[in-house]
Amino acid sequence: MSPPPPEHRDAVTLFVNAAQTVTCAGPGRARRGAEMQEAGVRSGVGVAVRGDRIVLVADDAELRGQFPDAVEVDCDRGVLAPGFVDSHTHTVFGRARYEEHELRATGVPYLEIAQRGGGIHASVRDLRARSDDELLSLAVPRLQALAAGGVTTVEIKSGYGLTVHDELRTLQVIARLAAAGPLNLVATCLGAHEVPLEFRERQGGRDAWIDCLVHELYPAVAAGELARFADVFCEPGVFTVPETRRLLEAAREHGMQLKLHADELHDGGAAVLAAELGATSADHLAAISPEGIAALAASPTVATLLPATMLFLGTGRQAPARAMIEAGAAIAVATDLNPGTSPLQSFPLVLTLAVSQLRLSASEAWIAGTVNGAAALGLAGITGQLREGFRADIAVHAADDFRALPYWFGERLCRVSWAGGRACHPFA
Ligand code: NIG
Ligand code: FE
């Protein structure tokens, strides 16, 4: 979609007639511990948008008084809120992996499927065989589905290419999706998603792949300005803590900020490493140790929890979110949209799982999906709040109470979402 014509850039749009407005307003940083209880729920309050910014958050009467010529979006007594920030996805991939879902149901564990050459490797074979245009057109409806649930910012990782060429291709597809808009996209280089089979099968191959990431992929990603973050799947059986440290230190030298897939299935000390490296986020954490919790609570690193993944894997476990909040950590939640462990395109369902599985309150779940999701992308001063000067990332939901979103699980309540002042649902 092309940007709005210049003559419309000064036009003001008012979002009015909401039953409740969840502002999430407060400091432009992650909320931790008890701060997560404050979602800033108000009534009679609307929002004025000019260009890509929120210019005023005030009572409807005041908005109309200040901007008498504005166009109005009628919230129809719904819930007006910041757009959700889906801070952990693998949206660019080829086919679904139905066979694995059933295999796990028979008792074969996730990491064993990968050991047998399935799992991530199956998606790698598939992605390598597809053209850029095909990958792009497969990703578009996934982003539209996220937007239809009220998401306005999405992080997307590479990680199914696992050659320098295919990783760069994936990141270029993400750049094309970002340029096309209207969603705000953030790219992450996950070249360290696995050791590719062709390297795994030869002697010294593991170190050769790590060398390739450090000396070839990261410099090329930096030269093309293709990713804001680098991520590593740090897990016993995938990348070790010393390997992850080497990879992330190299990525940082190339100007990337850091993320980790950390302590997802087994505690390997990855959360402690994330805190030590000053990573922007440590993600998954279902097997985090008490030391890991203490380290994250004492660091600025956001703990991003992915409850749909644990549900879909059928592990019967979830990250100890309450202990983490009580220790003072900042919790975000995200879909982890990917073909292996979380084929989920509904962000509101993550809010349901945040309450029912992670035992967050509705306010905590909203903060985890907005302000703290933004913080997990280094964007806490830009999006995730209805606040003057913030980007106009807005959603309207057909409900009279913000608690309806986690409550009516699987329901499609979002009526309108706008990213950077442009409609992303319904798609204009
Ligand atoms: O976040 N854990 C590693 N990566 C993904 C799954 C990737 C896959 O199985 O395709 C995750 O769950
Ligand atoms: Fe992931």
Image (cartoon, rainbow, N blue to C red):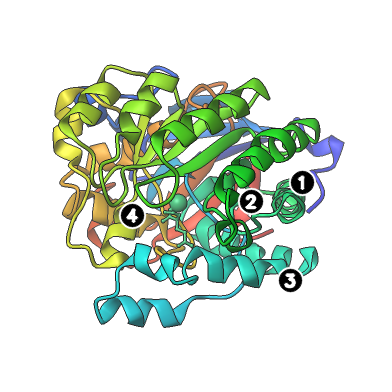
Ligand 1 positioned in quadrant: bottom left
Q: Residue at x 17, y 62 (%)?
A: 316
- Please tell me which residue is depicted at 44% across the width and 66% down the height of the picture: 114
Residue assigned mark 3: 130
Residue drawn at point x = 52 percent, y = 26 percent: 378
Q: Nearer the viewer, mark 2 or mark 4?
A: 4
Residue closest to the eye, 175 or 368? 175
Instruction: Give the quarter of the figure containing the C terminus.
Output: bottom right
Q: How dense is the environment of label 4, judged by Cα within 10 Å: few (below 14), some, or many (20 and up)?
A: many
Alpha carbons under labels 2 and 4: distance apart: 23 Å
Q: Find the distance from the CA under tag 2 to the CA under tag 1.
A: 15 Å
Q: CA distance from mark 1 to mark 3?
A: 21 Å
Element type at mark 4: helix
Residue 384's place in the image compared with 339, above or below, is: above
- Mark 4 → mark 1, Cα distance in angstroms: 27 Å
Residue 386 image offset from top left, x and y in percent: 46, 31
- Using the numbered discs, state the Cα–Cα distance from disc 2 to disc 3 in whole angstroms: 30 Å
Q: In this figure, which residue is indicated by the disc labeled 2?
A: 423
Look at the picture and state if 321 lies above or below 142: above
